[in-house]
Image (cartoon, rainbow, N blue to C red):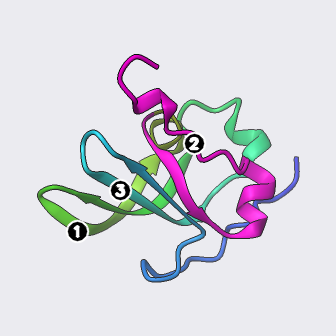
Amino acid sequence: MPRTNFGKSRTPSNPYATYINPGSGWKWKVLKTYKHSAAEKDDQYARWFLATSSPMATDEIGDGYAKDVLKYGVLVQADDAWKQEYGDCLNISKFLKGA
């Protein structure tokens, strides 16, 4: 299994990727991953180092489950390497009413 390409920590002002949930106001900035994306698919507990914002807090630093960010978030910004590995889909249709 290859090593992650996103293992060096970044600051919240320069994340590898940013995901948002438009309906709830949550935002996740990915600052580091611990596993390669191929290994994350088989691990429901795969985690990312994140700067998480909600309507009540801004850039709270800590780990979060990759599956939760991918399930509830929409990719809105990412490095080219991130887009190549995780996809370049800016699909917000899952949050639109009637979609």
Secondary structure of residue under mark 3: strand
Q: Could you say which is closer to the camera, residue 98 or residue 53?
A: 98
Residue type, label 3: Lys
Q: Earlier in the sequence, mark 1 or mark 3?
A: 3
Residue at 56 percent across and 77 percent down: it is: 9
Question: Could you tell me how far apart the alpha carbons at marks 1 and 2 are, in whole angstroms?
Answer: 23 Å
Q: Is residue 89 rendered to the left or right of residue 67? A: right
- Residue, x 35% and y 23% (percent of image)? 97
Q: Which residue is mark 1?
A: 58
User: Of all residues shown, which one is farthest toward the top?
Assistant: 98
Name the residue at 11% across, 58% down: 56
Q: Which residue is mark 2?
A: 46
- Looking at the image, which is closer to me, 41 or 75? 75
Task: Please tell me whether residue 94 belongs to the stretch shown in magenta.
Answer: yes
Instruction: Report the front residue among 16 and 43.
Output: 16
Circles 1 and 2: CB atoms closer than 8 Å: no
Residue 86 among those drawn in magenta? yes
The answer to whether residue 24 is left or right of residue 50 is left
Residue 96 disc label: none
Residue 38 in percent (x, y) is at 79, 41
20, above or below 12, in the image: above
Q: Secondary structure at mark 1?
A: strand
Magenta-drawn segment: 72-99
Horizontal side of residue 31 vs 60, given as left or right: right
Mark 3 or mark 2, which is nearer to you? 3
User: Where is residue 99 drawn, in percent x and y?
Assistant: 47, 20
Q: Which residue is mark 3?
A: 27
Give the residue type at disc 2.
Answer: Ala
